[in-house]
Image (spheres, helix red, strand yellow):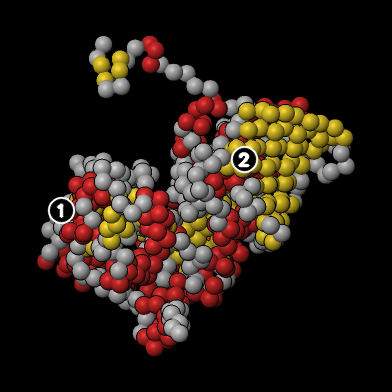
């Protein structure tokens, strides 16, 4: 028997974990990323989502039209619905025994997200305290758990309304230093409201309600940017909405049984195909997919009895049987709407015809560019790819969630990062100087800029955002004025032409330490602010040596290795909605220098002197 560093591998090495132990030891399998609440996909929000999903399922089944959500200052969460309530005699099993629940019974829950009997159990196991109270027809039962272990039960008579109340506190052992961000919760609740018109959700007393569903969603997302009134259709098991703006690229929102599928899936592909066929049927032409989709903002929501997702976090639908019915329903509804609304139809087709003309121009520019300098798509200067892609067919449509690419400022930072990166999943693209400011520029202008042409090809987004080769695109620039300017130029580029990359949660900014505080022969402490530096100096004492990092190029490979691994801090780039983007870019990146200067100067604190 071969020996390894940790000892002998024999029968004593084999372990069998209980469901509770497995959840706590491998939480990522159940809730995805852990995190501290600084990203909308962090685990604490998934815990909240799992509980709300159960309440949404009650509404979908016609039971309960109100859900109350509260989050306290200490991180304690409460969700109360007014549905049927969990059967009292099965209350404990439903929240603590894996693969137990009513979602296997399609008569009790025809359309549901919780198919595997896992979600609530994961919340229970990952909470320092978990309390569930069910009320049914004048009786209640309540169970209290600590880290998944039952602490006690009570039951009796009550005059409360039917339904379920779930309270939990995320376990600090699993989520150290976590903080709920209200804006992330609010955005998620608005999505629930849009997907379940008629449902009232209350978050800390504030009401979230939609009467028109996905039509309301697109109205909010596009604002005055939309070229025509939103085309909307609502059936029993499918709902969709679409419009166009003069922005570049396409923006899509997709949902299954009330669940936001961030990475789309077969239902989103079928929706896009149906829109194309409906427009072609009405127009009698044969437009290409890109001609129709450029500038399109669309949303699709379907209900499926047996949805198949790629993971427990349910970000992408895999059902192939839904394609045909969705394509047919969308095609017929779009064509019918256009026939009945000629003014909308004329505006839509004018947009598509303009796209055709623009794409011809872009193809001509791309052809000339390739002839002169882009000889091979597989040999992109300044790209150090990760092993996941090397040797594979490129680009890939299925990308592991841990793949990432760092967009670095110059060769020195890239060199240090390259020596300590995880070569399996971390790629590097070194920028040469400052990119062009693309605010107000047309898409074809990109191809006159070799740097950004290479960047598009490195990311795989030249033809479609669907081909994005990395799960996370990370801007890694210095924390000085030049570095911040480069960061803003890249943000302008992505927001102007690839806002779906931002809306889908793929763009991040690497937070790099400003200081290193270190005692001889001891592990250094990396500080990201002056306050952190002061605390570290106080803890380590006078003998500690403090180093100020002036730029990424001055950080050694050894230091880089400490903060691009498990301790890496990433700030997600998020958008509340699309229609604010032009105004923001115009203010910060446009030609209004005097107004921008006044804005900056009004926020500079000038010290007072006696």
Left or right: 281 with respect to 121? left
Q: Which mark is residue 128?
A: none
- Furthest toward the front, the residue is 542
Question: In this rendering, does residue 6 appear at all?
Answer: yes
Local SS, label 2:
loop
> Quadrant location of residue 499?
bottom left
- Crowd rating for badge 2 (residues with CA inside 10 Å; few <14, some 14–19, many 20+): many
Q: Which mark is residue 112?
A: 2
Which of 309/438 is in front? 438
For the N terminus, give its image quadrant.
top left
Identify the residue at image location x=27%, y=60%.
549
Local SS, label 1:
loop
For the C terminus, give its image quadrant.
bottom left
**Residue bearing the label numbered 1:** 379
x then y, percent, for residue 271: 49, 53
Left or right: 62 with respect to 471? right
x then y, percent, for residue 156: 85, 32
């Amino acid at each position: 028997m071969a020996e390894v560093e940790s000892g002998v591998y024999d029968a004593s090495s084999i372990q069998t974990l209980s469901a509770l132990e497995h959840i706590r030891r491998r939480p990522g399998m159940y809730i995805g990323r852990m995190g501290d609440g600084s990203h909308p996909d962090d685990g604490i929000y998934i815990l909240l989502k799992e509980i709300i999903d159960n309440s949404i399922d009650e509404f979908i089944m016609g039971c309960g039209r109100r859900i109350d959500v509260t989050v306290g200052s200490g991180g304690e969460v409460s969700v109360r619905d007014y549905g049927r309530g969990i059967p009292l005699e099965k209350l404990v099993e439903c929240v603590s025994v894996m693969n137990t629940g009513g979602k296997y019974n399609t008569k009790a829950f025809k359309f549901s997200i919780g198919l595997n009997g896992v979600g609530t159990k994961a919340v229970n196991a990952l909470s320092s305290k978990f309390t569930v109270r069910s009320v049914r027809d004048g009786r209640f039962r309540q169970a209290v758990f600590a880290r998944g272990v039952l602490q006690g039960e009570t039951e009796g008579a009550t005059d409360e309304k039917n339904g379920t109340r779930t309270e939990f506190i995320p376990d600090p052992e699993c989520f150290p230093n976590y903080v709920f961000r209200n804006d992330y919760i609010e955005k998620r609740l608005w999505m629930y409201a849009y997907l379940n018109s008629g449902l009232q959700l209350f978050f800390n007393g504030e009401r979230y309600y939609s009467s028109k569903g996905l039509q309301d969603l697109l109205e909010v997302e596009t604002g005055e940017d939309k070229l025509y009134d939103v085309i909307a259709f609502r059936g029993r098991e499918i709902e969709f909405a679409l419009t166009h703006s003069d922005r570049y690229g396409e923006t899509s929102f997709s949902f299954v049984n009330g669940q936001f599928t961030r990475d789309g899936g077969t239902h989103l592909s079928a929706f896009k195909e149906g829109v194309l066929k409906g427009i072609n049927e009405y127009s009698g032409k044969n437009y290409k997919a890109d001609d129709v989709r450029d500038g399109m903002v669309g949303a699709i929501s379907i209900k499926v009895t047996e949805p198949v997702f790629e993971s427990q976090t349910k970000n992408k639908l895999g059902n192939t049987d839904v394609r045909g019915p969705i394509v047919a329903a969308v095609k017929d509804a779009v064509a019918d709407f256009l026939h009945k609304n000629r003014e909308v139809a004329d505006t839509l087709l004018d947009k598509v015809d303009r796209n055709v003309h623009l794409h011809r121009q872009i193809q001509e520019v791309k052809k000339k560019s390739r002839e002169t300098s882009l000889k091979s798509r597989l040999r992109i200067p300044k790209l150090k790819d990760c092993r996941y892609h090397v040797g594979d067919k490129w680009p890939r449509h299925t990308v592991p969630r841990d793949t990432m690419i760092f967009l670095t400022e110059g060769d020195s930072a890239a060199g240090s990062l390259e020596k300590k990166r995880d070569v399996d999943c971390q790629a590097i693209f070194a920028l040469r100087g400052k990119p062009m400011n693309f605010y107000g520029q047309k898409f074809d202008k990109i191809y006159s800029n070799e740097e950004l042409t290479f960047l598009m090809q490195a990311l795989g987004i030249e033809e479609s955002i669907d081909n994005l080769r990395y799960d996370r695109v990370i801007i890694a620039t210095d924390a000085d004025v030049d570095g911040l300017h480069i960061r803003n130029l890249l943000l302008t580029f992505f927001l102007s032409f690839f806002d779906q990359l931002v809306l889908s949660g793929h763009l991040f900014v690497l937070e790099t330490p400003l200081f290193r505080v270190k005692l001889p022969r001891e592990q250094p402490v990396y500080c990201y602010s002056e306050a952190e530096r002061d605390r570290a100096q106080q803890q380590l004492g006078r003998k500690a040596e403090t180093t100020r990092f002036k730029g990424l190029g001055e950080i050694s490979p050894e230091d880089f290795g400490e903060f691009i691994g498990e301790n890496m801090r990433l700030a997600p780039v998020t958008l509340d909605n699309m229609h604010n983007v032009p105004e923001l870019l115009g203010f910060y990146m446009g030609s209004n220098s005097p107004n921008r200067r006044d804005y900056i100067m009004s926020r500079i604190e000038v010290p007072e002197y006696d």
